[in-house]
Image (cartoon, rainbow, N blue to C red):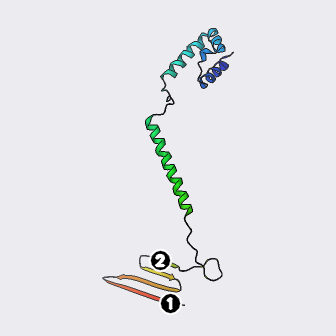
Amino acid sequence: MNDREFWARVDALLDDCRDPLDDEAVERHLARDPRAVDQYVRLTRTLRSLPRSPSGRLTRRTIAALAVGAAVLVALVAYIDFASDAPEAPVVTQGTSASSVLSFKISVVRESNAARSSTTIENDRRTDSREGIAVEGLATLITTYHRESTP
């Protein structure tokens, strides 16, 4: 067994949570190569200095967190199920079309330093307004225009 195969074998045994010294091929290689023994000792010291993973036991805090999570999940599923059982609002239709516009409103406003104009269309009514400001010396001129139209 060469060094690459040896370390691959050691890695595989550690990944399987097995002691590499229980493996005969690892023992034979360590008996033949003193340099590998030193490297293996450094590896085991390093591994022992690392923090250990949890033991797999559930603590009270973990159990409580899981219980709260499960209760929230059950409440969410019940709410979604209840909401899906609610009757849908009736759709109001006029004439033979499947849908129609009952009311609408559109507003457009344009502003600049010297003027402001707006157009509002609500159902069948249109409103236009314009305001202009002109400043000359101490006098200020304000003009306002407002128009409503109905077709």
Residue 8's quadrant in the figure?
top right
Residue type highlighted by circle 2: Arg
**Between tags 2 and 1, which lies in front?**
1
Element class at badge 2? strand
| Residue drawn at x 68%, y 16% as measured from the top left | 2
Where is residue 3 shown, x and y percent of the image?
Answer: 65, 17
| Residue drawn at x 49%, y 45% as measured from the top left | 69
Where is residue 104 shown, x and y percent of the image?
Answer: 53, 79
- The tag on residue 149 is 1
Residue 10's quadrant in the figure?
top right
| Residue drawn at x 51%, y 53% as measured from the top left | 76
Q: Could you say which is closer to the camera, residue 151 or residue 136? A: 151
Q: Which residue is mark 2?
A: 110
Residue 59 vertical position relative to residue 37 in the rendered view, above or below: below
Residue type highlighted by circle 1: Ser
Quarter of the image with the N terminus is: top right
Q: Could you say which is closer to the camera, residue 120 or residue 141? A: 120
